[in-house]
Amino acid sequence: MVAIKWDESLSVGVDLIDEQHKMLIERINDMSAALNRHHAAPKIIKTLDFLIEYTDFHFGTEEKHMVKNHYPAFEAHKKAHDDLKVTLGHLEEDFMEEGATEDLAGSINVFLVNWLINHIHAIDTEFGKFLREQGIKMRE
Ligand SMILES: [Fe+2]
């Protein structure tokens, strides 16, 4: 299992976003662990629900500040978030239909870890740079 670990290379230079990314990483790791240890379905579904809920909350935070500060790349960034939300919904459906299959464990593990790392490096870093250049502080 690929566990993801937060380190400075994942920092976008904005504390609130970094804190939420750390929490998101924790949630992804919880989900991977629950699948890999073949926990009972209710526990897995609870963990997946939590991951989905936290992802929603985190994207909401970023998007709120993009809109408020007229971030020029808002549309593309929001689309990346929306696409992931759809994928998470599919993962949940797959789990409901097929249970904790190897495929699902692999998707959660590899796909989400890769998605998050790429998203942070390629897209969130740009937003972080924008916020810093504009001298904008994100508090909530
Ligand atoms: Fe983002």
Image: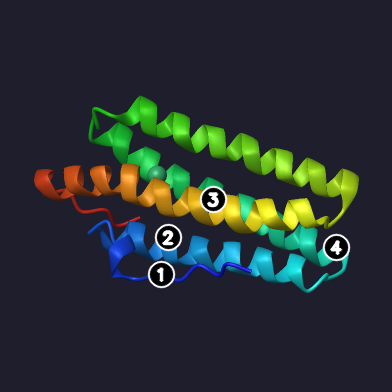
Between 15 and 4, the residue placed more toward the observer is 4
Closer to the N terminus: mark 2 or mark 4? Answer: 2
Residue at x 56%, y 52% (from the top left corner): 112
- Crowdedness of circle 3 by 10 Å Cα count: few (<14), some, many (20+)? many
Q: The disc labelled 3 sits on which kind of residue?
A: Thr
Closer to the N terminus: mark 1 or mark 3? Answer: 1
Closer to the N terminus: mark 4 or mark 1? Answer: 1
- Crowdedness of circle 2 by 10 Å Cα count: few (<14), some, many (20+)? many
Q: Which residue is mark 1?
A: 6
Query: Of the numbered discs in the image, which one, if any, rests on residue 21?
Result: 2
Whole-angstrom CA distance, mark 1 to mark 2, is 8 Å
Between 62 and 31, the residue placed more toward the observer is 31
Whole-angstrom CA distance, mark 2 to mark 4, is 25 Å
Q: What count of labels does the image hold?
A: 4
Closer to the N terminus: mark 3 or mark 4? Answer: 4
Whole-angstrom CA distance, mark 3 to mark 4, is 20 Å
Q: Position of residue 106 (x, y in %)?
A: 69, 56
Task: Tell whether circle 1 marks a residue whose Cβ is less than 8 angstroms from ligand 1.
Answer: no
Task: Tell whether circle 3 marks a residue whose Cβ is less than 8 angstroms from ligand 1.
Answer: no
Residues at circles 1 and 3 in contact by the CB criterion of under 8 Å: no
Residue at x 49%, y 65% (from the top left corner): 23
Q: Which residue is mark 4?
A: 42
Q: Name the secondary structure under disc 2.
A: helix
Q: Which residue is mark 3?
A: 55
